[in-house]
């Protein structure tokens, strides 16, 4: 069974929420995360599936664990208890 599509819009909403909660501008977050401001705009809009390194930088800049940042991506996925995920 293929993995469900990630909810990129939910990720974008979470990034924007955490950014605003931290009182960061888009430019300030981009600089702190080491990415271009356009990347932050695209992630917040849910238009891109960002690289793990980009998400790691954003999480670090916002002072949250990467798992907390990306949790909304899979929040609506059905859980199968006791069934390990396949490695690809």
Image (cartoon, helix red, strand yellow):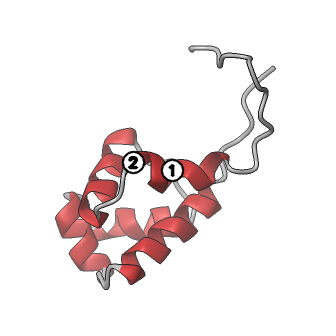
Considering the numbered disc 2 on the image, is that residue within a helix, a strand or a loop? helix
What is the tally of numbered marks visible in this picture?
2
Q: Residues within 10 Å of mark 1 (few under 14, many from 20)?
A: many
38 left or right, relative to 34 = right
Q: Which residue is depicted at the point 36% across and 51% down?
A: 65
Residue in the image at 48% along x and 76% along y: 17
Checking the image for residue 11, the label placed there is: none
Residue 64 as seen in the image, left or right of residue 45: left
Report crowding for label 2: few under 14, some 14 to 19, many 20 or more residues within 10 A (C-alpha).
some
The vertical placement of 29 against 3, above or below, is below
Q: Dot 1: what SS?
A: helix
Spatial CA distance of label 2 from label 1 is 6 Å
Q: Is residue 40 above or below residue 82?
A: below
Residue at 29 percent of width and 81 percent of height: 24
Q: In which image quadrant can residue 1 be found?
A: top right
Give the residue drawn at x 25%, y 78%.
Answer: 27
Q: Nearer the viewer, residue 41 or 18?
A: 18
| Residue ID for mark 1 | 70
Q: In the rendering, at what x and y percent does residue 42 appear?
A: 47, 65
Residue linked to disc 2 = 66
Please say if the residues under marks 2 and 1 sit with CB atoms less than 8 Å apart: yes
Q: Quadrant of the C terminus?
A: top right
Judged left or right of residue 32, residue 39 is right
């Amino acid at each position: 069974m293929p993995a469900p599509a990630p909810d990129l819009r939910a990720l974008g909403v979470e990034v924007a929420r955490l950014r605003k909660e931290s009182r960061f501008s888009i430019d300030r977050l981009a600089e702190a995360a080491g990415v271009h401001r356009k990347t932050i705009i695209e992630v917040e809009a849910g238009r891109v599936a960002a690289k793990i390194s980009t998400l790691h930088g954003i999480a670090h800049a916002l002072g949250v664990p990467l798992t907390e940042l990306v949790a909304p991506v899979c929040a609506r996925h059905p859980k199968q208890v006791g069934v390990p995920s396949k490695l690809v």
